[in-house]
Image (spheres, helix red, strand yellow):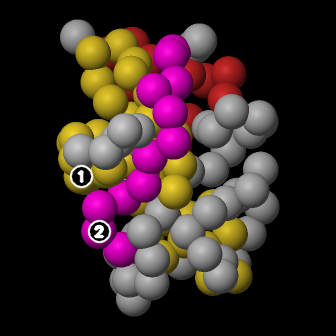
Amino acid sequence: MQHLVFVYGTLKLGGWNHRWLNGAPCLGEARTLEQYSLYAEQYPFLVRGEPRYQVVGELYAIDSSTLAHLDELEGHPHDYVREEIAVIAPGGGSVMAWAYFHATPRGVLLASGVYHC
């Protein structure tokens, strides 16, 4: 089964956790339909509180095994929580994709919805 996942931090191309995507195809740059906040310490934290901006990331098509590995990496559901959200896909149009949220912000609020690896 194929799943869409929206990544916004260390899983992006060039990020140190990108290998966890197991060579899944990148469908391109995407952004959240709704506004959220993005904080960063050593890595980013996507949170729902005090929505500030659309978050920019990448969209990947992954299989169920890779999704299970990402859950392990992100500590789902005890650290980050995987939720399905609407994202604006490459080329326009809205799709539903998995994203990993953190319950509480950590670090510094980023000025924009872009985390640079």
Quadrant in the rendering for residue 51:
bottom left
Quadrant of the rendering where the N terminus is positioned: top left
The residue type indicated by label 2 comes to Glu
Q: Earlier in the sequence, mark 2 or mark 1?
A: 2
Label 1: state its secondary structure: strand
In the rendered image, the residue lying farthest to the bottom is: 50
Residue ID at (31%, 45%): 92
* In the rendered image, the vertical position of residue 37 relative to residue 13, given as above or below: below
Residue 113: percent from left, percent from top = 55, 69
Q: Is residue 73 left or right of residue 27?
A: right
The residue type indicated by label 1 comes to Ala
* In the rendered image, the vertical position of residue 104 relative to residue 72, given as above or below: below
Does residue 33 belong to the magenta stretch?
yes
Gap between marks 2 and 1, in whole Å?
Answer: 7 Å
Label 2: state its secondary structure: loop
The answer to whether mark 2 and mark 1 are in CB contact below 8 A is yes
Q: Residues within 10 Å of mark 1 (few under 14, many from 20)?
A: some
In magenta, the rendered stretch is 24-36
Q: Residues within 10 Å of mark 2 (few under 14, many from 20)?
A: some
Residue ID at (51%, 15%): 24
* In the rendered image, the vertical position of residue 98 relative to residue 85, given as above or below: above
Q: Which residue is mark 1?
A: 86
Residue 112: percent from left, percent from top = 60, 75
Q: Which residue is mark 2?
A: 34
Q: Is residue 65 left or right of residue 40?
A: left
Q: Give the number of callouts.
A: 2
- Residue 74 seen from this side: yes
